[in-house]
Amino acid sequence: MTAQAAESRDLAVVIGLEVHVQLETDTKIFCGCSTEPAEEPNTNTCPVCLGLPGALPVLNEGAVEAAVKVGKAIGASIPEETAFHRKNYYYPDLPKNFQITQYDAPICQDGVLEFGHEGERRSVGIRRAHLEEDPGSIKHVREGTESLEARTCSIDRADYTLIDYNRAGTPLMEIVTEPDFRDPAEVRAFLEKLEEVLEYLGVFDPTRDGSLRIDANLSVVDAEDVDADGEIDEDVLEEANRTEVKNISSHKGAEQALSFEASRQKKLLESGRAVAQETRHFNETHGNTVAMRSKEEEKDYRYFREADLPPLQVSDWKDEIEIPELPDARRERFQAEYGLSAEAASKLTSTKQVADFYEQLAREYDADLVATWVADNLLGELNYRDMDVTDIEDRLEEIATLVELVAEEEITAKNARETVLRGMLDDGDDPKTIVDREGLGKTSGDAVQEAVEEAIEENPDAVEDYHSGEDGAINFLVGQVMQKTGGSADPGEVNGLLREELEG
Amino acid sequence: MSDSAVDSDEVRHVADLARVDLAEEELERFAEQFGEILDAFETLDEVPEIERESDLVNVMRPDEVRDSLDQEQALQNAPEDEEGFFKGPKVS
């Protein structure tokens, strides 16, 4: 876009994404080294992922399966034949001096992802999604006598680098969208949906460090060049200078980085200056983007076919590999099958784990009661503690037991949430221990009757007040009984029993 | 012998990409050598086509963990290492 002074220009933002997700496999993409995070550096490596001479890559079938699942979920086509390329660049995180990736024949092409944003359905085109290997991880370090941790610093202050190749060769999928986003908030909603879908497919673990990394291209065009349906002429896009923002690692970071970048570009254009076509680095601490030294152009990567990996012909896997019911479909089914509100269904399908847990319980107990328990009580109390279901995934059986106690009316809903659930989350106790310790089990009729008789015997003054027509006295006695039964008796029932006893 | 296939500017660019520092006089020399190497490839055009085995497809392995090298083995060819890491010069 040329730099013409036009203060009152109405500007529109255009964003496209390259999202790198780590695929959940047991082993690396081209060798049998484990992908489990290791305590010690360089302990999950072998001649292949260290790039030692003569070592040959062999493709992990699990990574291909995961890629096909992703393709299926986004309605992409899996081409007859797909192949790998070498992308050449020199950087110490790449032991071979090239990265094995896919270039002109990616495994997934032309997909689409729908998501909700501000009450509207949005749909973003996925141009391609391809498999590649992750590089290793680099530490920038200063000389000195302090601990390594204390000497780890930013790239420009470093004296040397230390490299750990444990991560090198981890399977990644790079998902490239069309430039269909018009607003940074949309990007965030898209990423949330993408993670949700990938998690449902069982190919992605958002809790893993570095499992999601985003590069975003952003340019600003005249608003009048955007059609009513949001389409923009390709020539206009081609002409507009765009920046590529790197180093984004979260949904929130994406929105923040792109909001900053959008207003930076708008300000430049509004003051009659030009936007430089460049790569910028997102600084999460400062919430801004800074220009990076210009890197290679695409042709400098000298892509060529990876002759050590024969091509893949897996288009028929699309029919053979099953994928689970995806979040949108499940949400709709939950509303229809369990009569849930849209809001409850949405909360209960937020992750596959929550949805599975809900269904497991809803089959046994009242679906409404279970919905309240999982969506409101459990997720609410977890959220309050900044916890996630994944933090208690080994305790879901205990939660199920608690729901059973409520469903079978063995304890009151109030006690269950306020005492048992909170105690479970705060102190790690199991529900039955808490119920026994606090004496919360709904007291049997005999015990209530006993407490009623005791209360009458111990409080002659209140009994007298009752008989002389002071109606407040009965409330005092009900309170006494409730105390004796640890709050587990039904106050209405106690009231009736007391009156019976006093009148009798 | 080709004199236009590779010039010294191209050699400089490729050397920069490979982070190799070449002196001016080396650029000329390498340009000439690259030209000769590329010419040599043309000889391949004279190789007659022969029958060959059909290409492999779908060569994959199951997603099963195999033993990795231990840290000491992994680092044994490294000129320098520190606290289990490979050590290298600073980068930009």
Image (cartoon, helix red, strand yellow):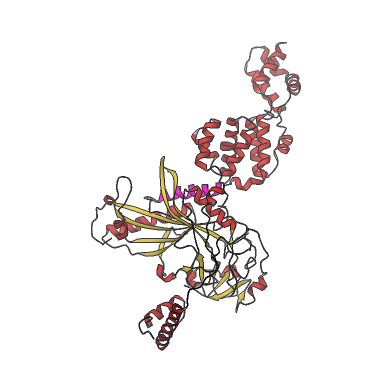
Q: Nearer the viewer, residue A253 or A441?
A: A253
Q: Nearer the viewer, residue A346 or A284?
A: A346
Q: For residue A378, which quarter of the picture?
A: top right
- The N terminus of chain A sits in image quarter: bottom left
Q: Position of residue A222 (x, y in %)?
A: 28, 53
Q: For residue A490, which quarter of the picture?
A: top right
Q: Is residue A173 above or below residue A396?
A: below
In the rendered picture of this protein, how many numbered marks are placed on residues?
Answer: 0
Q: Position of residue A456 (x, y in %)?
A: 73, 19
Q: Position of residue A72 (x, y in %)?
A: 50, 49
Q: Residue at x 41, y 50 (%)?
A: A125
Q: Is residue A146 above or below residue A342?
A: below
Specify start and end residues of the magenta stretch as a single range: A184-201
Whether A199 is among the magenta residues is yes
Residue A175 visible somewhere in the drawing: no
Q: Residue at x 38, y 81 (%)?
A: B6
Dominant secondary-structure state across the stretch colored magenta: helix
Residue A258 visible somewhere in the drawing: yes
Q: Is residue A502 above or below residue A200?
A: above
Whether A210 is among the magenta residues is no
- The C terminus of chain A sits in image quarter: top right
Q: For residue A143, which quarter of the picture?
A: bottom right
Most extreme residue toward the top, as rendered?
A504
Residue A223 relative to residue A407: left or right: left
Q: Nearer the viewer, residue A350 or A446?
A: A350
Q: Is residue A16 above or below residue A415?
A: below
Q: Position of residue A92 (x, y in %)?
A: 53, 72
Residue A482 relative to residue A62: left or right: right
Most extreme residue toward the left, as rendered?
A5
